[in-house]
Image (spheres, rainbow, N blue to C red):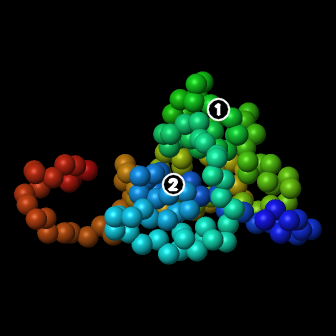
Amino acid sequence: MFGELMTSEKLNFILIVSDTFRWDLLNYKFEVKSGVYAKTPNLNEFYRKSIAFTRAYHASFPTVPHRLDLLTGKFTFTYYDWSPLPKNEVTLPMILKKRDYVSAMIVDTPHIMKDGYNFDRGFDGWVWIRGQENDRYRTAPKEIKLPCSSEKIRNVNT
């Protein structure tokens, strides 16, 4: 397997980090476990063409601390909390840039894109898919007919 990787060409790589692929629904090959109604043909095909690190363990689980660990290669959970990426930390995109890789980040969590959080630092480009969690951006602000009175729905007017 590794002999196939020995090439003079610079390989591309994609790093997927998702808070929403539940471990109890998918196995390490992105295959849906039996008894679970979900189809993931694109993830399955992606896996078949990829190298998977099956013994790679993250040090932090929450969104921001995990990204800190991942981007710096350090176990930061014991000394950084849910806080910005420190300006003195060297990040994976910074290292990639020195090796002439082009990097991009696609993110849908507002915590990563907060002003001053610096998680976009070093990337050549980034896309923020708006509207997740407490991000007040609305993609389609249309009036909708609620199935009950608005008082029965949490945060309907916020």
Q: Badge 1: few (under 14), some or many (20 or more) residues near its Cα, within 10 Å?
A: some
Q: Residue at x 48, y 39 (%)?
A: 62
Amino acid at pointer 1: Phe
126, 50: nearer the viewer? 50
Q: Position of residue 60 (x, y in %)?
A: 55, 36
Q: Where residue 146 is drawn, which disc sits there?
A: none
Q: Which residue is mark 1?
A: 75
Drawn side of residue 104 relative to residue 11, left or right: left
For the N terminus, the quadrant is bottom right
82, 157: nearer the viewer? 82
Q: Is residue 13 visible?
A: yes
75, 79: nearer the viewer? 75
Total marks placed:
2
Q: Residue at x 73, y 51 (%)?
A: 93
Q: Residue at x 53, y 74 (%)?
A: 42
For residue 58, what is the image quadrant? Answer: top right
Q: Residue at x 8, y 60 (%)?
A: 148
Q: Which residue is mark 2?
A: 18
Q: Position of residue 98 (x, y in %)?
A: 85, 52
Q: Badge 2: few (under 14), some or many (20 or more) residues near its Cα, within 10 Å?
A: few
SS state under label 1 = loop
For residue 5, what is the image quadrant? Answer: bottom right
- Spatial CA distance of label 2 from label 1 is 19 Å
Q: Is residue 149 above or below residue 112?
A: below
Q: Is residue 64 above or below residue 131?
A: above
Q: Is residue 10 visible?
A: no
Q: Position of residue 17 (x, y in %)?
A: 56, 54
Amino acid at pointer 2: Ser
SS state under label 2 = loop
Q: Earlier in the sequence, mark 2 or mark 1?
A: 2
The residue sitting at the right extreme is 8
Q: Position of residue 96 (x, y in %)?
A: 79, 54
